[in-house]
Image (cartoon, grey):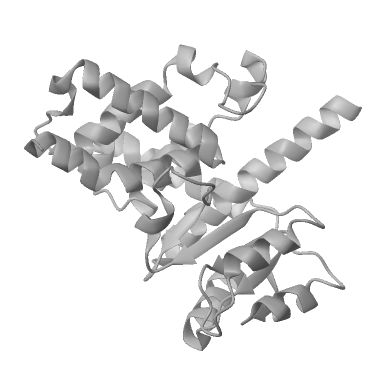
């Protein structure tokens, strides 16, 4: 394996995480990553960049992302959307900037290079995204987490963002019990719980009776970013930063509101 191939393999799971956060689902995000890899195979030189292979990979992805022909293509396994609707769902540039910094941990110069803008422009975009965050509609959040300290930290973060904590479930059974009387607007869930139950299974059972965006939290994100099976669209790695929770929660709710607005237009 060449050095450039090894670099791509190293960063590929995290590019999938970023792509899924941008598109709101696994299939579409992974399709953009596949298109990026196809472009890389066609021209190995595109992975070369003075700021390193990771910046080069994300920079190439961004060029693919901003390509009208790819954005307008149908998502694998779906019927696709008319071009205008599809483009309306694309994550706007301020959120791209925010996710690069908050979710992917790029420095300002590296994030600016990925987006092909200068650092001052990047800062302006991140600030604009912050104003969007402040305008988010508050919702009820269910936390599924068995670690007391992590659960407390998530509660504080969620409330600091203006949301309400519906409750904290430490097991699969507790999660089901908490949602009997009230439905959450957002779910934050650990993937593996200490009692042996699965946060994934709990969420799947919950979503059989209602819809809500879900953000999974795990100490091993690479295991759920292979693209080889049904995997989470929104994933946060432990230990997490407050800005990461803020960015991903905002993005998940962004897609939820977009879908609801579209439904209202269709039924009106």
Considering every residue shown, the one lying at the far top of the view is 69
Can residue 139 be seen in this snapshot?
Answer: no
Q: Report the residue at 81% width, 33% height from top.
A: 263
- State the residue at coordinates (27%, 48%): 106
The correct choice, above or below, for 89 with respect to 175 in the image is above
- The percent coordinates of residue 113 (x first, y second) are 23, 33
Total marks shown come to 0
Residue shown at 13% from the left, 21% from the top? 45
In depth, the one of 30 and 249 nearer the eye is: 30
Residue 238 spot, x, y in % from top left: 39, 69
- Residue 251: percent from left, percent from top: 55, 47
Compare residues 205 and 52 and report the one nearer the observer.
205
Q: Quadrant of the C terminus?
A: top right
Q: Is residue 151 visible?
A: yes
Using the image, determine if residue 208 lies above or below residue 22.
Answer: below
Residue 166 relative to residue 29: left or right:
right
Give the side of residue 180 with respect to residue 104, left or right.
right
Q: Position of residue 22 (x, y in %)?
A: 49, 38
Vertical arrangement, residue 177 with respect to residue 215, above or below:
below
Q: Indicate whether 15 appears above or below 103.
A: above
Locate the N terminus by quadrant.
Answer: top left
Q: Between residues 254 and 1, which one lies in front from this camera angle?
A: 1
């Amino acid at each position: 394996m060449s050095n450039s191939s090894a670099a791509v393999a190293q960063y590929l799971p995290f590019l999938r995480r970023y792509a899924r956060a941008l598109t709101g689902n696994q299939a579409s995000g992974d399709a953009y990553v596949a298109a990026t890899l196809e472009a890389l195979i066609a021209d190995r030189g595109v992975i070369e960049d003075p700021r390193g292979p990771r910046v080069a990979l994300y920079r190439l992805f961004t060029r693919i992302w901003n390509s009208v022909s790819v954005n307008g293509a149908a998502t694998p396994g779906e019927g696709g959307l008319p071009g205008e609707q599809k483009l309306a769902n694309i994550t706007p540039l301020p959120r791209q900037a925010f996710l690069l910094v908050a979710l992917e941990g790029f420095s300002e110069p590296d994030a600016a290079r990925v987006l092909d803008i200068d650092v001052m422009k990047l800062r302006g975009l991140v600030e604009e995204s912050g104003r969007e965050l402040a305008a988010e509609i508050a919702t009820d959040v269910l936390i599924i987490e068995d670690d007391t300290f992590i659960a407390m930290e998530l509660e504080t973060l969620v409330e600091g963002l203006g949301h309400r904590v519906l409750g904290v479930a430490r097991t699969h059974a507790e999660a089901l019990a908490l949602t009997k009387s009230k439905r959450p607007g957002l779910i934050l869930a650990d993937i593996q719980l200490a009692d042996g139950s699965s946060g994934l299974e709990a969420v799947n059972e919950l979503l059989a009776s209602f819809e809500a965006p879900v953000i999974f939290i795990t100490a091993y994100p690479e295991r759920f970013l292979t693209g080889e099976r049904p995997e989470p669209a929104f994933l946060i790695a432990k230990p997490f930063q407050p800005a990461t929770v803020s960015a991903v929660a905002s993005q998940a709710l962004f897609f939820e509101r977009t879908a609801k607005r579209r439904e209202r237009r269709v039924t009106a």
